[in-house]
Image (cartoon, coloured by chain):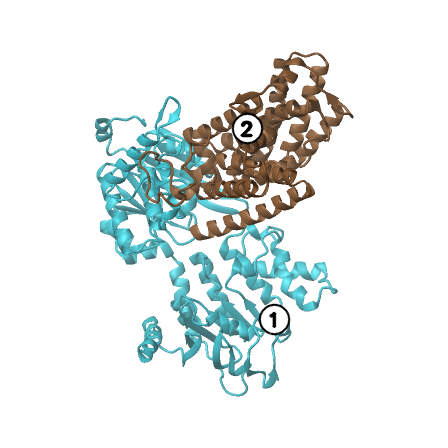
Chain colours: A cyan, B brown
Amino acid sequence: MIQMTAEAAEATRTEPVVQMSGVSVSFPGVKALQSVGLTLRPGEVHALMGENGAGKSTLIKALTGVYSIDEGTIIVGGEPRTFHSPAESQAAGISTVYQEVNLCTNLTVAENMLLGREPRSFGRIDTRAMNRRAGETLTRLGLDIDPKSQLGTHPIAIQQLVAIARAVDIDAELLILDEPTSSLDADEVAKLFEVMRTLRAEGVAIVFVSHFLEQVFAISDRMTVLRNGQFVGEYLTAETTQLQLVQAMIGRELETLEKIEQAAEEHTVKTQGAPLMEVIDLGRKGSVESVDLQLFEGEVIGIAGLLGSGRTELARLLFGADTPDHGDMRMRSKGTKLRTPRQAIDHKIAFSSENRRSEGVIADLSIADNMVLAMQASRGWLRPIPARTKDRLVRKYIEALDIRPADPNALMRNLSGGNQQKVLLARWLITEPELLILDEPTRGIDIGAKAQIQQLVADLSKDGMSVVFISAELEEVLRLSDRLVVMRDRRKIDERANEDVTVSDVLEIIAGEVRNDA
Amino acid sequence: MTTVISPPESPAGSPAPRASRGFTFPTRFLPVIATIALFIAMFGVGSFRYEGFSSPQTLLSVLVDNSHLIVLAVGMTFVILTGGIDLSVGSVVALSTMIAAETLRAGWAAPLVIVTVLLTGSVLGLLMGLVIHYFEIQPFIVTLAGMFLARGLCYVISLESIPIKNETFTSFASGTIEIGDYFITPSVIVALVVLVIAAVVLHMTRFGRTVYAVGGSEQSALLMGLAVARTKVGVYVISGFCSALAGLLFSIYTLSGYNLGAVGMELDAIAAVVIGGTLLTGGSGLVLGSAVGVLVLGLIQSFISFDGTLSSWWTKITIGVLLLVFVLIQRLFTRRTT
């Protein structure tokens, strides 16, 4: 069916190019896909939608033979097929362009487009014919790129287009574009869409994965939505609104989030008396200019600000990870100097870093070992935690935080991002802190885990724990915090009670300061 | 024999991509041009300082004395281009000389001996390649094991050095090819033929392009559906074959099999490849550069022997300095392009 002529293809136009049904894929301890279906028709752009961790990439890799499927069928061109490698699926007319450009920057554009299929004469590669053919394909797609130039000399956007040109040259019946626009600017996206429309008109089926809803609505004909590795539904783009799509992607977590917001609003803090922590004129050269801040028991302070505004730097000062140049700090009205994280831990302060992978997770240790690390550190290495205590604590937090798999001996590397984050939170909760500093605790984890972590923060503050919550997602900060601190250019520019503050209010505060400066 | 490349006198003279040669672009030649420039500069300094150094025979003698190393460096280039390394080659050279000497002493016919040696080297390379690819073990460790294995096998064959008295081998050894007033040996011809074949394979076959692709990004090559497994195993077979061939040339050069011979020769080969401009991370470099790298190493030795007062350890010191300088240059080069 690869050699199907144009007429034959026309005749079977309604036949799907690919039909996946009941596909399940699992990794150690994780069920990544559960009985998912996907139907791709010729001459259609099909958007594959879902939050991070919904299973989009897994589904694509299951189709192209990178992962093997546990259950289900994949019908390609009317025949059931199982691919064992990307080479096999390519031979069947399925080409994939990944988010990261998977080409060789040390070779030329033409070589990259035709690697493995170079035109040959007498066993020798015919370089001239290769450059000509590559040039023709590029021209057909309306791309002005010198096929003889080295790929590495071009910007990522051009490399991305070359990757698509390679896929097209294979005579693909199905072209999979996995987040191709994440590194492109508006003009480059327009160029990409032009190429996609050209191919669609030629009868190619295209799978388009993107996080940008506007782009999806601009280019796609049909959408399939996944959530938590499960099939939610297939929709015609023309008959779907953005709100409907978002609801399909997020699902019942939307309700949970609304509930958290309600709880946070009802949550009140006594701001009389001595604060738990007070800093006056605290700062460090090149990191944060003098900050005054009071933090009361059971209070959640949200820190908002753009990347590089000093959010993380402030958190590190509060935790003693960086030493302040000037200013005073008081814990429960007593003058305190924090020079090392160890001292902060002794003062019952905990800090969960934004760099989960490099500063928190120890991938080759088990869930249990990762959890007791901070507690062990605060006890000193000469006083091991009794096995029974350790066991009890670990089981308690696995249950309390709904960590999956619920196996204390599972290795961290096999956990999803959300579950890793929960283990890190448990690591600090075991030390029973009075102040918990969370820097970007929900970055890069799926919506379900996000909601759970927000719920946890709300519950902890209700029990009297003080929390400093830092996140780039303003909705999250506003949902959880009692008081809001806005940072910009390494300074605190605003502080207010979080009552009826909206996202646009915060953006205005950040932008307003810019106008004042100018 | 160096007509394939652009004349070294005009390194920056052709910035525009030339239509006649589709696969070339100027940046790819830069490291090789640097090596050639170094070679010419060294030759100039030598000619200036020492009487008789400027004779073409100096150059030809370098070729004669190092033809086995050129073959070795060619095989090593394939491996390094994929981002691997082969530490076994020196020991395989020694093993090859031992097998040749021992079988010749036992009265085997010369062609049979040659085939046996070449087969042994290739099979050793094949085994190492299979282990490296399918068990996903570092090439450094696998070929280190191969190095010990081959060296150990030398002692299994004989504890002492074995002289070679076979007529085919001795006549090949004493044979010379006159070029005007100067001469080279048949071994030089063998080395140059290997060099040309390697260049053709690397640049004009799918296998060759896949070697570069794997070195550029193995993950990408796999996702592009290229025959990564065959290529990765293949380069170690080639390196094994070249080691065996180099061993034959070495046994002709020394007319003996010596189990302590060629110690550290794998490092000379790696040094030559790196000085020749091939990136140790793979994906970039020319086999011609490795040959020039061998000539640079050879010329250092000529320096020492012409001077007469320098200890031969200066060879090692100079190689060390050159290697460091070239690696630093490569580092700057790659940092600039990325």
**Vertical placement of A49 versus A455: above or below?**
above
Determine which residue is flagged by label 2.
Answer: B238
* Residue at screen point 39% across, 62% down: A255
B284 with respect to A368 (left or right): left
Q: Chain of mark 1?
A: A
Q: Nearer the viewer, residue A61 or B56?
A: B56
* Residue at screen point 40% across, 59% down: A253
**Where is residue A430 shown, x and y percent of the image?**
61, 66
Which residue is outermost to the right? B159
Q: Nearer the viewer, residue A13 or B81?
A: B81
**Where is residue B312 shown, x and y percent of the image?**
68, 41
Disc 2 marks which amino acid?
Answer: Ile
B62 with respect to A447 (left or right): right
Q: Nearer the viewer, residue A470 or A510?
A: A510
Q: Nearer the viewer, residue A97 or A446?
A: A97
Determine which residue is flagged by label 1.
Answer: A341
From the viewer's perspective, is the residue at label 1 or at label 2 nearer? 2
- Quick one: label 1, few (<14), some, or many (20+) residues within 10 Å? many
* Marks 1,2: beta carbons within 8 A: no
